[in-house]
Amino acid sequence: MEGRWVQIEQGPVPLRCWWNNPQKESKNIVLVLPEVFGINSWVRSVVDRLAEQGIPALAMPLFARTAPELDLGYGEDDLLEGRRHKEQTTTHQILDDASTSLNWLKQQYNQSKINVVGFCFGGHAALITSTLPDVDKTFDFYGAGIATTRPGGGPPSLELLSQTSGKLTCICGTGDPLIPEADRTSIQEALSKADPSEVRLSYVEIGDADHGFMCEERASFSPKASTLGWQLIMNELKE
C-alpha cells in the first residue's frame, strides 16, 4: 500500500497527483487539496494516512498551470513562492481541475462517494469544490480568505454556500492570525443562515489553534488540535 505519482490528462491541463489506493472496495474516496506549498511530503503523508485506514485518496495540485510539480517546505521564501502561484489561480481553474480529478476517481471506484479535504488555500478551494454535484462531504481546514475574497476575483467564496449540495464542515482555530475573529464570525453566521439546523453545513472552532495546526512539519502544529481534526474526518467518513 504505497503511494505513487499519477498523471491525469483528461482535463484542460495535465494534473500530476499523488495517489494511494488500497486494493479493496471502499464506500469513500478522498480528494486532498494542498496548502500553497504544493503536494509536498506532508500532503503526501495525509494521502498515505487515509490509505492506511482503507480509504483511497488523491492529492491534486492547485497550481497545475504555473507550477505543476510544486513541492515546497515551510520557510519564508517557500511561503512567498507559494503565494505567488496562489495569486495566479482562479475559481474557474479550481473547479475545472477538481472536476477532472473527481471524474478520474469515479472511474477508479465506481459506486463510491467522493469527499474533499483541504488545508489552508486548499481549504478555501475545498469550499469552492463543495459546489460540484459529485462531492458528498467537504472538510475546509483553516481556509483563510473565504469570508473576504475569491480566487481570481469576485464576491467572497462564502457566497457560494447556497450551491453546496453535500455536507460541509469549516474548521478554524481561535489562534489563527489569517482568520481573525471577524472572519470566523462571518463564516459561522453564513453557515448557520444557509443551514439553520447546522447538520449539513457546520462550523467547528478549536481553541488556541494556530494556522496550519494539522501539519506536523509546521511550527504551528498542535498535537491536540490535529488529533481533533483527524477524529472529525474519520468519524464522518466511517459513519
Image (spheres, rainbow, N blue to C red):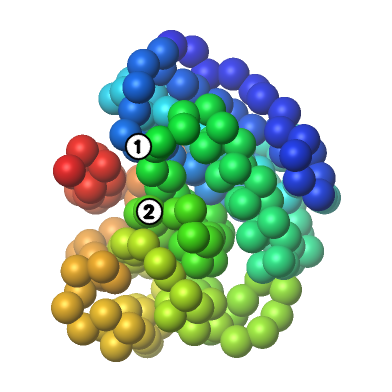
Residue behind mark 1: 28
* Residue 13 image offset from top left, x and y in percent: 81, 45
Left or right? Give the position of 152 relative to 27. Answer: right
Rendered position, 43 above or below 26: below
Residue behind mark 2: 136
Total residue callouts? 2
Q: How far is the residue under mark 2 from the one under mark 1? A: 9 Å
Q: Residue furthest front?
A: 111
Binning the other alpha carbons within 10 Å of mark 2 as few (below 14), some (14 to 19) or many (20 upward) gives many
Q: Quadrant of the C terminus?
A: top left
**Which mark, residue 186?**
none
Q: Looking at the picture, which amino acid does disc 1 mark? A: Asn
Q: Quadrant of the N terminus?
A: top left
* Residue 146 image offset from top left, x and y in percent: 50, 75
Binning the other alpha carbons within 10 Å of mark 1 as few (below 14), some (14 to 19) or many (20 upward) gives some
Left or right? Give the position of 114 relative to 26. Answer: right
Q: Quadrant of residue 173?
A: bottom left
Left or right? Give the position of 101 relative to 223. Answer: right
Q: Is residue 33 visible?
A: yes
- Contact between marks 2 and 1 (CB within 8 A): the answer is yes
Residue beneath the point at 75% across and 56% down = 85
SS label for mark 1:
strand
Sequence-wise, which precedes: disc 2 or disc 1? 1
Residue beneath the point at 36% across and 16% down = 24
Q: Quadrant of residue 195?
A: bottom left
SS label for mark 2:
strand
* Residue 7 image offset from top left, x and y in percent: 72, 28
* Residue 193 image offset from top left, x and y in percent: 29, 88
Residue beneath the point at 66% across and 59% down = 94
Q: Nearer the viewer, residue 112 or 147?
A: 112
Rendered position, 93 above or below 196: above
